[in-house]
Amino acid sequence: MSPTDSVSSGASTADALLTARDLHKRFGDNEVLRGIDLTLHRGEVVVLIGPSGSGKTTVLRALNGLETPDAGTIVVAGGPDIDFAPADAVSKRTRAQKRLALRDRSAMVFQHHNLFPHLSVLENVIEGPWRVQGRPKAEVIAEAKVLLARVGLADKENARPHELSGGQQQRVGIVRALALRPDLLLFDEPTSALDPELVGEVLLVIKELADEGWSMVVVTHELSFAREAADRVLFMDAGVVVEEGAPSEIFGAPTHERTQRFLTRILRPLDGD
């Protein structure tokens, strides 16, 4: 279950685990993504920050094959390579197959836990690797138990989701993603639905995974987490990447006026209007 060794964010695109180029997405009259470029290297943690509606979640959903961009490319080391240019019916079927392959390489942890309420914690964790991936049931059960113990939930494997706190449910969601053995972990504001006192326990698990070298793209409003865990931070606004850099650069000396205004309002809310 160990991820591959990490590399520095300064590695070349040729060394990338995933490369997204010029992604565009429109919902009706609303152009949500307007030419997004993103590169992730193995073992790297990239954190996306920005105001609500800036396109962060749409980027994650595109990387997980849950959303189909209108244009652009996504290339994953070892495949798949997907070109979202307009295509005929045959190539559309091919792209659909590649999107499924893309989903096999990544796992998403959502804002809301999305656990099956009628299944136990253990059953929720093994559902994907056993029924979808077709791995032996005994193998995935043994691995699931190790992962649950890893996040402090060994005694909850027979509990139903409604018997858990929000933080415990989100930790089950993280374990469920890890059980799929993904190359890439995607987190969509994993603490936004939690009570404030439960946020820390979930962020600690994610920080430990980052320290272990898991490759991640994280959307979050928890800027202290971004400072501590990210290798690179991308600030998004209105469907574009306004600025990116190391946490020390983005939080310590942002160069773009829009980034400066956003951070001022978030980090010093009492100083605003």
Image (tube, rainbow, N blue to C red):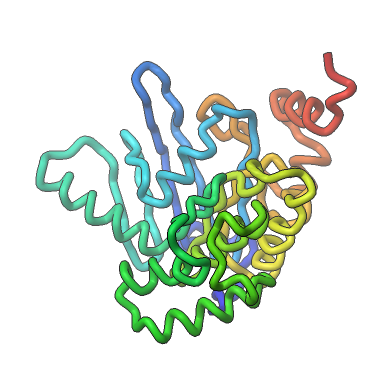
Left or right: 169 as drawn, with respect to 199: left
Which residue is most to the top? Answer: 273
Q: Nearer the viewer, residue 108 or 258?
A: 108
Q: Is residue 119 above or below residue 263?
A: below
- Give how far across and how far down residue 218 sits, in percent: 60, 50
Q: Is residue 183 visible?
A: no
- Give how far across and how far down residue 158 sits, in percent: 54, 72
- Give how far across and how far down residue 241 sits, in percent: 57, 35
Residue 119: name its quadrant. Answer: bottom left
Q: Is residue 218 above or below residue 184?
A: above
Q: Is residue 228 above or below residue 179?
A: above
Q: Residue at x 40, y 44 (%)?
A: 62
Q: Residue at x 51, y 76 (%)?
A: 144
- Quadrant in which the C terminus is drawn: top right
Q: Residue at x 81, y 37 (%)?
A: 253
Q: Residue at x 37, y 26 (%)?
A: 26
Left or right: 79 as drawn, with respect to 22: left
Residue 137: name its quadrant. Answer: bottom left
Q: Nearer the viewer, residue 36 or 127?
A: 127
Q: Is residue 169 visible?
A: yes
